[in-house]
Image (cartoon, helix red, strand yellow):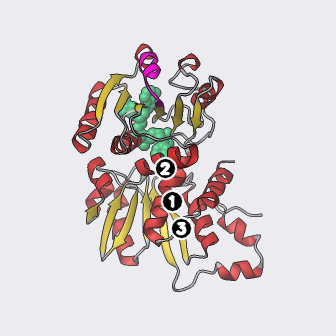
Amino acid sequence: MREDKRGNQIAELRGSTTSELSSWDITARTRVLGVIGYPIGHSLSPSMHNAALRYLGLDYRYFAFEVRPESLGQALAGMRAFEFAGLNVTIPHKTKVVEYLDELGWEARVLGAVNTICPQDGKLVGHNTDGKGFVRALREDAGVELRGKTILVLGTGGAARAVLLQLAREGASLVTVAGRVREKASNVIQLIQKACPTCTARAVELAPATLQKEIKKCDILVNATPIGMCPNEGSSLVPCEYFRQGLVACDLVYNPRRTLFLQHAGSRGAIVIDGTGMLIYQGAIAFELWTGKAPPIEIMREAVIQGLA
Ligand code: NAP
């Protein structure tokens, strides 16, 4: 089997029978989907989306496009000219891309960041599906409900903001953000309180003593920093003894799946949720926006897990 430089689609096709190949032929009607980022070679999205498209027999293909920051405007003009059926947007373009779009969905407008673009009535509409993806992973994969819950999020970056906004929208009673730069944490809180006035939001320092106290009080703890991500698997912001039975511990990092944070949490009896669920559901929501079809979640999950292996 041969692997192409972007993923395993060629390997799968080469291994397929002739009849499978003909049903997956690219024709003059095949629609283009994709992801733009820089760099992009690590992305699991092509494997995940192509597995789903192929499973449902939909005449689309999903590609990874490496777009340098200085070429973003041209890439978006290209998307319009070629009438792509949709794009995902990843680092470093999520914020900057907003200026090239015609309209924004509510989350994208509040966050000032887009991870999904949909053409609609001749316009390009930007959405942010990260927060909804996270909440669906909690609810659908782990049966965790959010109404009335107390939640502590570590980190103040783009993923933390998306997750906090959705948690506040879903009825969490108190969201607390812990950041190493006080001002960034305060900005996040202002954003959440303005968008969701019924939720109480507060900021705390990302320091060991504060964390210990805050973790004791929370129902759900979320690591929204890159700490523990490959190749730095040996690190975690939270010492093992801070976890307890019944706490829901979520890590947005998905490579490795079982981070040190989650290993510690699991060893102390906490419920653990890794970052693959958020990755899958944020993609599933985009897939439905583009194709109008219900995404095959388990097929997408299998592709992600294979990609990580
Ligand atoms: P980001 O915008 O760069 O934010 C990173 C955050 O982590 C910032 O608040 C940063 O603090 C903090 N941080 C970084 N290093 C730290 C350290 N050594 N100690 C304390 N805090 C530290 O990144 P992001 O886009 O939010 O992504 C965060 C993580 O979520 C990444 O691992 C990413 O892969 C993951 N993610 C997963 C999914 C998914 O689908 N599962 C989706 C999006 C993101 P400062 O601001 O002070 O630097």
Residue 232 makes an appearance in the image: no
Q: In which quarter of the image is residue 163?
A: top left
Examine the rendered structure and indicate whether residue 3 appears above or below residue 306: below
Q: Would you name the residue on which mark 3 appears?
A: 62
Q: What element carries label 2?
A: helix
Q: In which quarter of the image is residue 104?
A: bottom left
Q: Earlier in the sequence, mark 1 or mark 3?
A: 3
Q: Where is residue 10 in the image (x, y as percent from the top left)?
A: 68, 68
Q: Distance between the residues labelled 1 and 2?
A: 10 Å
Q: What element carries label 3?
A: strand
**Residue 236 vs residue 242, the one in the foreground:** 242
Q: What residue appears at the point 28 percent right and 34 percent down from the top-left corner?
A: 189
Q: Is mark 1 on a helix, strand or loop?
A: helix
Q: Would you name the residue on which mark 2 appears?
A: 136
Q: What residue appears at the point 53 percent right and 67 percent down from the top-left corner?
A: 62
Mark 1 vs mark 2, foreground winner is 2
Q: What residue appears at the point 26 percent right and 30 percent down from the top-left corner?
A: 186
The kind of residue tagged 3 is: Tyr
Give the crowd class for mark 3: few <14, some 14-19, many >=20 residues within 10 Å.
many
The kind of residue tagged 2 is: Arg
Give the side of residue 168 with respect to residue 146, left or right.
left
Mark 1 vs mark 3, foreground winner is 1
